[in-house]
């Protein structure tokens, strides 16, 4: 098969940045010293060179990137679905099996980062070659594509058949192992570029991505079909729904609550720093200030997440928890956030530090979590990763949200913060310079004496003339 460099009138394929990242991973996996160990494998009576197993791929990904087994399996499946790895046995299933299933690396000639998409002529040659080799035993969707292409490019179908027969004749001169490898490479390439119905295409991105439901293959209406339909209808009936009136009331309440805090709707106090030279707004709302503004303190009462996202609010909440002897809960939450967003190389050290400080028996700042959450957390210690403490963090988060946070809002500390908060005064400013009223120009100095004398004479004659009349 030959990929056309630039079909006439064709548009180049959209560049996808994630493909270059995946290809760097594949290149690292093929490194002769530090990559996945490749060896010749026997497939029935055929010897296939440079083959790897699913277990070897999983172990290399876990060791190389310090990720969990679940994440390694997900990354391996993505590599197979994009055609960078292909199975040697189950050719139609582009899924990574974490067992002794044999895989091979796709040659760079068939990588998805090629500039031009696969042409219909190449696909027609591939289907014609497969139709000749299997004597018409094509899959249903391949038969449909074969008929469509036959009608569409009927004027050059003789060329398609001739190319297919020449490629089959050249393949007979190769070894059996090489013929198997080339057939798997071509089939994987076309499974990615022309996926069967019901399989979403990995090359479609954004809003153009097709729905798997819309391309679903029509199922035979047997007992299993109706059983699934009944179960789907039952789930739809049991799904909780909210009345539109309740939704509108919640939306109005949210809008009225957040309107004073929206700089576009209510303006910035003391002035808008984007259109004036006064940057007091940024100074008063800095991440760390001695006295916060009243609007900022009021936002802490909107939700627990608003309080934690504000460094000043989180510091005051920590002071409140220290008075209640439960500051270790917030410290544990902060440690989990540092683990989640920290560097990859520091994960094992951070996991061990968090465990020794908060979770180990007899820890100095032991936090109270249930037994099931503790079991799931301890299982993750064997292979540390950045998300292993998510269950324990969520448990402590809900504990603070339902218990400590309501008491903080009702405490004298929060009321004192509201009373002492700064209320900035609005400074008068002109928003748009072009709306200023034009100032009148001052009269010329040469005209001042004449105008002054004229005004004086007018003023003098006015009263005198009036008196004379009188």
Image (cartoon, rainbow, N blue to C red):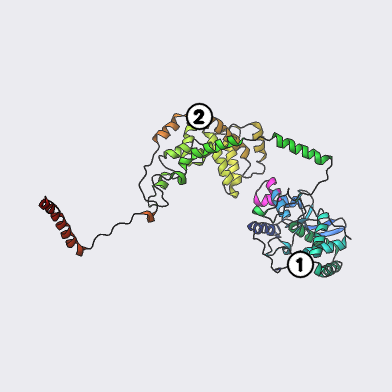
Q: Nearer the viewer, residue 144 or 438?
A: 438
Farthest-out residue, left: 468
Secondary structure mainly formed by the magenta segment: helix
Q: How far across and how far down the image is residue 162, in percent?
A: 84, 70
Give the residue displayed 66% in from the left and 52% down from the top.
64
Q: Residue at x 67, y 56 (%)?
A: 22
Name the residue nearer the viewer: 412 or 264. Answer: 264
Q: As drawn, is 104 to the left or to the right of 396?
A: right
Residue 2's disc number: 1
Which label number is shown at residue 199? none
The part of the image, by quadrant, that contains residue 7 is bottom right
Q: Residue 67 magenta-drawn? A: yes
Q: Which mark is on residue 407?
A: 2
Element carrying mark 1: loop
Residue 366 lies in the magenta stretch? no
Camera-nearest residue between 72 and 121 = 121
Task: Assess whether mark 1 and mark 2 are in contact (beta carbons under 8 angstroms).
Answer: no
Task: Point out residue 3 in the picture as x, y percentages from the top left corner.
Answer: 74, 66
Q: Is any atom of residue 315 visible in this view?
A: no
- Other-residue count near label 2 (Cα within 10 Å), few / some / many at <14 / 14–19 / ≥20: some
Q: Is residue 327 left or right of residue 18?
A: left
Q: Which residues are magenta?
A: 59-73
Tell me which numbered mark, 2 or 1, is placed earlier along the sequence. 1
Q: Residues within 10 Å of mark 1 (few under 14, many from 20)?
A: few
């Amino acid at each position: 098969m030959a990929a056309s460099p630039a079909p006439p009138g064709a548009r180049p394929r959209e560049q996808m940045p994630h493909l270059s990242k995946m290809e760097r991973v594949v290149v690292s996996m093929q490194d002769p010293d530090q990559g996945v160990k490749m060896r010749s494998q026997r497939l029935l009576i055929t010897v296939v060179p440079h083959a790897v197993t699913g277990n070897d791929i999983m172990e290399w990904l876990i060791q190389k990137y310090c990720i969990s087994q679940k994440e390694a399996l997900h990354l391996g499946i993505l590599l197979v679905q994009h055609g960078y790895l292909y199975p040697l046995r189950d050719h139609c299933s582009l899924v990574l099996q974490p067992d002794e299933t044999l895989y091979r690396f796709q040659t760079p000639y068939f990588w998805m980062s090629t500039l031009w998409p696969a042409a219909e002529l190449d696909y027609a040659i591939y289907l014609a070659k497969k139709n000749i080799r299997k004597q018409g035993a094509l899959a249903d969707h391949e038969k449909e594509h074969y008929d469509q292409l036959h009608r569409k490019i009927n004027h050059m179908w003789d060329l398609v058949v001739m190319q297919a027969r020449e490629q089959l004749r050249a393949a007979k001169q190769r070894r059996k192992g090489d013929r198997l490898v080339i057939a798997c490479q071509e089939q994987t390439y076309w499974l990615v570029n022309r996926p069967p119905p019901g399989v979403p295409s990995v090359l479609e991105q954004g809003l153009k991505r097709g729905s798997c439901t819309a391309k679903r293959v029509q199922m035979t209406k047997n007992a299993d079909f109706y059983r699934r339909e009944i179960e789907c209808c039952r789930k739809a009936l049991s799904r909780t729904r909210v009345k539109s009136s309740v939704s509108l009331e919640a939306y109005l309440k949210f809008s009225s609550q957040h309107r004073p805090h929206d700089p576009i709707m209510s303006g910035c106090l003391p002035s808008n720093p984007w259109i004036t030279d006064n940057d007091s707004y940024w100074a008063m709302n800095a991440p760390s200030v001695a006295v916060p503004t009243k609007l900022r303190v009021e936002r802490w009462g909107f939700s627990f997440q608003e309080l934690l996202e504000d460094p000043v609010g989180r510091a005051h909440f920590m002071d409140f928890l220290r008075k209640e002897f439960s500051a270790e809960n917030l410290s544990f939450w902060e440690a989990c956030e540092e683990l989640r967003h920290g560097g990859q190389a520091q994960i094992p050290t951070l996991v061990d530090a968090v465990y020794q400080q908060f979770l180990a028996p007899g820890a100095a700042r032991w936090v109270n979590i249930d037994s099931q959450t503790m079991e799931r957390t301890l299982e993750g210690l064997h292979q540390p990763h950045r998300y292993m403490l998510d269950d324990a963090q969520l448990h402590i988060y809900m504990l603070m949200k339902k218990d400590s946070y309501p008491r903080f809002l009702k405490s004298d500390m929060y009321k004192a913060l509201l009373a002492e908060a700064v209320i900035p005064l609005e400074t008068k400013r002109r928003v748009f310079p072009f709306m200023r009223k034009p100032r009148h120009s001052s009269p010329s100095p040469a005209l001042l004496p004449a105008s002054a004398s004229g005004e004086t004479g007018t003023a003098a004659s006015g009263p005198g003339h009036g008196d004379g009349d009188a």
